[in-house]
Amino acid sequence: MKTFFKAAAVALSMGGMLAGAATADHHGHSASAKLDGILAAQPDEAKARYQYRHPKETLEFFGVEPGMTVADTLPGAYYSRILLPYLGDDGALIGVQYSMTHRGIDYKGDAEKLAKHKAWPARFTEMAEDWRGGSKAAISAHLFGDFPASMDGTVDVFLMLRATHHLNKHDGAAGTLKSALADIMRVLKPGGTLGIVQHRAPEGSSDEWAKGFNGYVKQSAVIKAVTDAGFEFVEASEMNANPKDQPTESDYVWRLPPSGDAKDIGESDRMTLKFRKPE
């Protein structure tokens, strides 16, 4: 009799595991199909970039799913337009821009430009309303250095897509990358993901050229900066690599599409790096 009950318990347990796996597969398939539909509905100029930016593969690599709270650094009509309908009614999108300290260096103290930058969060939230695609996801926006305490420990995935070079170029004196990473660490949930896609400098290039002013940063330098900030390095992917992009120290990334004319190369060679906030 004991043997019978033990066998029955094992069978019941296995059945529950299989049912759970089926449910997980169903949810994953549903999310994937939803993302496919959103990507198919994007403007043609956005679709033209899929061959270089791989938005589906990138978002799935970083574990972005409907219902999550996701922060998008230096956001615009490209990824935010995909994220808002994908995150859905139970999700939230947080637009993030560079700090006032950062822009104070960029704008050399220009009061008018700085005032406009300070007002950016309100402009973004208004602009993002046009990208909802029927979604009721919450929309907010903040500057680095000005995250409210209410954001602490609330973000599932923090994206820095082609934004790290700007933070890195002023990091020496102003500590812009270090302070941004501290902000990200604070607002991510324990176990949350920091996803970075960044124009990649050849490892043999000089540190000065690869500081970020030319758009490129070394992958080793990015990994070191992020792990030094306390994040765990999870995985790298070559999904956004482009071996045709072999920049020399006389080059800058903006020679390439979509802003430049070097169409024979395509968009930049990019690292895709996944980090995790320790639990």
Image (spheres, helix red, strand yellow):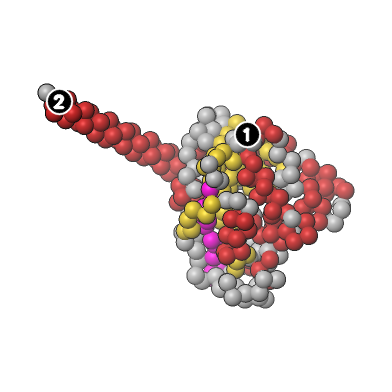
Depicted 218 relative to depicted 66: above or below = below
- Residue 169, given in percent of the width and then of the height, sits at 71, 61
SS for tag 2? helix
Q: Residue at x 79, y 50 (%)?
A: 101
State which region is magenta: 263-276
Q: Residue 29's mark?
A: none
Closer to the camera in the image, 64 or 78: 64
Q: Which residue is mark 2?
A: 2
Instruction: Please state which of residues 130 and 239 is positioned toward the viewer in this rendering.
Output: 239
| In the displayed structure image, the side of residue 118 where residue 90 appears, left or right | left
Position in image of residue 82 (x %, y %): 53, 43
Q: Position of residue 245 (x, y in %)?
A: 55, 70
- Most extreme residue toward the top is 1
Count neighbours of disc 1 (C-alpha within 10 A) and say few if under 14, some if 14 to 19, many if 20 or more: some
Total number of numbered labels?
A: 2
Is 173 placed left or right of 80 in the picture?
A: right
Tell me residue 72's x, y (percent): 61, 45
Q: Residue at the spot x=48%, y=58% of the render?
A: 236
Looking at the image, residue 139 sits to the left or right of residue 37; the answer is right
Three-letter amino acid code at disc 2? Lys
Residue placed under numbered mark 1 in the picture: 139
Amino acid tagged 1: Ile
Q: Quadrant of the N terminus?
A: top left
Graded by Cα atoms within 10 Å as few (under 14), some (14 to 19) or many (20 or more), the crowding at tag 2 reads few
